[in-house]
Image (cartoon, rainbow, N blue to C red):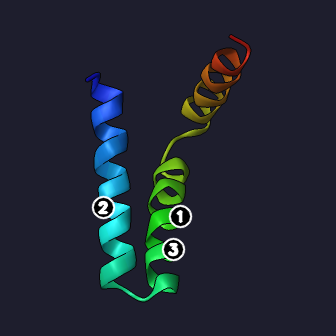
Amino acid sequence: MSKNAKIATGGALVGLVLLIWLPWWAALLIILGVPAAAYLTLDPSQRRRLRRVTRKELGR
């Protein structure tokens, strides 16, 4: 199993546990808020680089 697959599996499991353990709105806030906060901590050059890499991979 690749490193990215392990990370995705772990994220899915954490999401399921949060949905069971917390009210649905709190789990949704955490699931959407953490990646958004991480993106906002990047400086503008890192954001441009991330968008460029994402677009390249979509065109494969």
Q: Is residue 20 left or right of residue 28?
A: left
Q: Residue at x 60, y 24 (%)?
A: 49
Q: Which residue is mark 2?
A: 14
Q: Tell me: residue 25, above or below residue 11.
A: below
Q: Is residue 17 left or right of residue 47?
A: left
Q: Are marks 3 and 2 in contact (CB under 8 Å)?
A: no
Residue 29, horizontal then vertical, whole percent: 51, 75
Q: Residue at x 43, y 89 (%)?
A: 23
Q: Tell me: residue 24, above or below residue 31.
A: below
The three-letter code of the residue at mark 2 reads Val
Q: Residue at x 74, y 14 (%)?
A: 59
Q: Tell me: residue 44, above or below residue 4.
A: below
The three-letter code of the residue at mark 3 reads Leu
Q: Earlier in the sequence, mark 2 or mark 1?
A: 2
Q: Give the numbered dot on residue 28.
A: 3
Picture quarter with the N terminus: top left
Q: Secondary structure at mark 2?
A: helix
The answer for how far apart the CA atoms under marks 2 and 1 are is: 13 Å
Residue 41, horizontal then vertical, whole percent: 48, 50
Q: Are marks 1 and 3 in contact (CB under 8 Å)?
A: yes
**Which of the 4 image quarters holds residue 60?**
top right
Q: Secondary structure at mark 1?
A: helix
The answer for how far apart the CA atoms under marks 1 and 3 are is: 6 Å
